[in-house]
Image: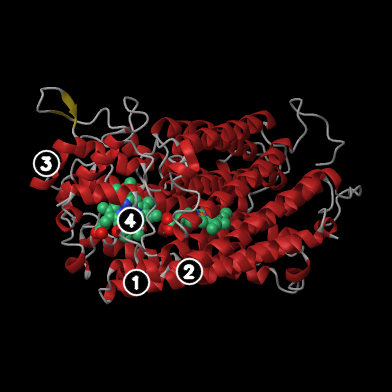
Amino acid sequence: MGGYKEYKIGVIMFLAVFGMAVFMTIGIGGVYLGSVPATQLALEKQVHYGSSAWSIRDPLMKGWNQPKIQKADGTMVSDPVGVGKKIFIREGCWHCHTLLPEQTSDWEYFGAPPLAGDFVGESPTVIGSDRKAPDLMHVGSRMPSMAWHLQHHKDPRSVQAKSIMQSFDFLETSELKALATYMVSLK
Amino acid sequence: MSTATAAYDGIRPGTAAKHAFFSAVVWLCIGASFGFFTSLRIAWPDLLNGKEVMGPLASAFAFGRVRPMHITLVIFGWISMAFVAAMYYMTPALCNCRLWSEKLGLWNIWLWNVGLVVAAISLLVGANSGREYQELIWPVDIYVLVFILGFAAVNTFNTVLQRRTQGMYITIWFFLGALVMIWMTYFIGAIPDLFPVTGLNEAYMVWWHAHNVLGLWITPVSAAIAYYVIPKVTGNVLYSHKVGHLHFWTIVAFYSTPGAHHLMGAPLPEWMKSFASVSGVMILIPALAFITNMVLTVQGKWQMFSDNVSIQFALTGTLMAVPLNFQGAFQQTRAINWYIHGTHWIVAHAHFALLGFSTFIEIGATYYAIAKLFQRKIYSQSLATTHYWLTTVGFIGFWTTLTLAGLIQASGKVYNTTFIDVVYATHPYMVGRSLFGLTIVLGQWIFLYNLYKTATAGEPVTEKNPPATVYYT
Ligand code: HEM
């Protein structure tokens, strides 16, 4: 006894049904989404962010392998916008905040929803699924002040008494600056 | 599985299952405790937080790092490991043979435990992939695919291969099918980690993975376990194999397609959203097939619901699937999704599925299997009953407070309330959630204690092949 011979039809059917489901969703969906053309915004994001995913070259997610820019004194540093995004991922800000205004009354409060092409080349997108806190896709337009962000990240309750955002006072000063630069860049 | 059985590759049959069940319950206790810990962050953000109080640990125990760790520990530590424990126990029992390799089983479980420690540390130091439910970094993903899911599949498939029974019971189809599907699902979820897939395509794959971990792994294997425990403990024959077929095939066909319903707010094309939403409603078919089958199997034995702890847990879990699936089917339609998307309502639903439905069934199976494996009666019925009520009352309160908080947040969207007022209005509910969560956590530590005592000090059962109910009296 034993063997799977008596289940030949079952096994073939199983592989066919499951394979079909993967083909219809990941296959067709993936080809479609993969062919969306990049918008201007997407190209700008690619320049600043690079890849925000975890990498062996940056195991502690400090932004070491983000795109480099030249400072006034000629030294090359990682683009603070890209570093900020990496820290945003590392600290799990996206478990409270979304980066995706919805097609509801969000228009009035959090600004316009994005286009499909706005995400091309961005990885990961961290659009988030849980919104315990304001959407941040256009936070730079609402809150353009670096100083405000710096203060808020260090001690949210000093600027908003009822906030449930935890304080990020344990971040290094350069990291706080990068985060604030990233926030302000989200126009 | 009597103690007289000859040793096989030097290891007594059932050893891998014992290690797996105990490890899983330890992860349940730790994972749920961390859930409680993160819930405090949302209720009182300054409690045990910040550089001054936590010193160098402040970053590791921040909300954004502990939250993904909670999820990893409960899904991959508790639920998945309890699944494999059940496979190591039930597959040989149903195939009338030994586990293919106890040694491979032990390696599987201990490499798994090591992997979870590594995963937890990596999340705490901030090495996070940024993809929800797929937060582990790619070296850990590969480890999971090979040593955790791969080893478990090899062992289970080979066990079935050497079976000494005619045909396969429904539990076995689900085990085998789910092992193939979770491997593929996990792999697809890891594709953006391993290959340059970006943008919405990546988001879609990540949510396809998140959806199918629930749909093609947690839901079917939980059901498979109920298909074993409920007939076995009640002593009744399964009501219908045909309905079981319907359940199996509709899971494979309909649960695998609606991944996009998690992205209803994203700029995906209309056809993807509509397809997902319609096939998502079809999930009601397997769900109702399963529930009907189980409830009809218990016919004539309903008194066991109050006097047998395995049935109590397994049936409560099964019955939870009724509201759970109706909630799921309707909340993913366009008409409702925009309202509750992103609110605590969703978190309530997630716990409904993983705690109310799945965890309850596995707890029922764990009580049964531990007693059988150690040939001892459950150490304390009253502790088991306490565990049941703490978990049940805790869960119902947990779900209710979160759902109410979600409705407050949802109405905040519609009436354009200042955001911070909504945050403030949900505060009492967040406190309530923490308290009910603590109730659940207490219950799980009692569970662990009771199992430990059962293994070491439970009254031995010496009869050969006693009926299942002997283990509970
Ligand atoms: C075995 C039992 C449990 C399982 C399987 C489980 C599973 C989960 C899952 C899947 C999520 C993600 C929810 C989402 O993204 O929508 C989650 C989040 C969470 N869970 Fe649990 N959980 C369990 C027990 C607990 C307990 C006892 C508590 C205690 C209070 C708890 C507190 C939390 C918190 C605070 C979050 C984060 C929610 C948020 O970000 O708003 N969990 N859990």
> Which residue is tagged 3?
A43
Q: Residues within 10 Å of mark 1 (few under 14, many from 20)?
A: many
Foreground label between 4 and 2: 4
> Which residue is tagged 1?
B410
Q: Amino acid at mark 2?
A: Tyr
Q: Amino acid at mark 3?
A: Leu
Q: Amino acid at mark 4?
A: Ser
User: Label 2, label 3: how many angstroms apart (C-alpha)?
Assistant: 43 Å
User: Label 1, label 3: how many angstroms apart (C-alpha)?
Assistant: 34 Å
Foreground label between 4 and 1: 4
Mark 1 residue CB less than 8 A from any atom of ligand 1: no
Point out which mark residue B364 bears.
none
For label 4, the SS is helix
Q: Quarter of the image containing the C terminus of chain B? A: bottom right
For label 3, the SS is helix
Comparing B81 with B67, the one in front is B67
Q: Where does the image place residue B152, in percent across and percent down from the top left?
A: 57, 37
Foreground label between 4 and 3: 4
User: Label 4, label 2: how many angstroms apart (C-alpha)?
Assistant: 24 Å
Give the letter of the chain under mark 1: B
Foreground label between 2 and 3: 2
When the figure is inspected, residue A103 is found, relative to residue B220, above or below; the finding is below
Comparing B45 with B333, the one in front is B45
Point out which mark residue A158 bears.
4
For label 2, the SS is helix
